[in-house]
Structure formats: structure tokens, C-alpha cells
Image (cartoon, grey):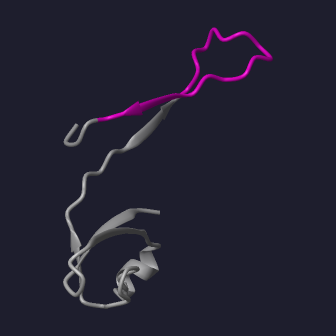
Amino acid sequence: MPDHEFYCYACMKTFSKVLTRTEYEEGEVLCPHCSSDNVEQSWSVFYPITFKKAPENQAPGTAPKVVIDRAPPGA
């Protein structure tokens, strides 16, 4: 589930919230600081995480190695 960044105009604080697609589409987000609904989604950075398979020559019975590759934004 994506992590969304929001700005609250009532208390002037930013916060992030993990929302399902349904919750995001319903649009009913409340500020966790002051419970106001006067919030706006702000831009945030997205870092995709990809997984690569272990090499074919890995010894049988050994734990697979997972390589996490963090791509920079815009890559």
C-alpha cells in the first residue's frame, strides 16, 4: 500500500498515511494531530524497490540471497 504525504491547513502540520486504493479514492483523510478534514495531499518522493533472483550457480540447500536495489527517482 502506498504511503501518502498530506498537509493540514488547520494546524499547519504535515503527516503521512498509508492508504488502500479504496481509502484513497474515498478521499476522507483526517489529520492525526487535530482531526481536521482540511487536508491536501502534497508531493512526495517515490522509491521503487526491486528484487533480483539469486544467481543460477548458488549452492543447493543454501538460503537464497535477496538483493534490494533502490532506484533513484526518475530512473
Residue 61: x %, y % from top left: 80, 17
**Residue 20 as seen in the image, left or right of residue 65:** left
Residue appearing at x 44%, y 81% in the figure: 23
Residue 68 located within the stretch drawn in magenta: yes
Q: Quadrant of residue 38?
A: bottom left
Q: Which residues are magenta?
A: 53-71
Q: Quadrant of residue 10?
A: bottom left
Residue appearing at x 38%, y 78% in the figure: 24
Residue toward you, 34 or 17: 34
Residue 41: x %, y % from top left: 24, 74
Residue 50: x %, y % from top left: 44, 37
Q: Quadrant of residue 29?
A: bottom left
Residue toward you, 58 or 1: 1
**Residue 34 as seen in the image, left or right of residue 62:** left
**What predominant SS class does the magenta segment belong to?**
loop
On screen, residue 46 above or below 15: above
Residue appearing at x 33%, y 69% in the figure: 15
Residue 10 located within the stretch drawn in magenta: no
Residue appearing at x 44%, y 72% in the figure: 19
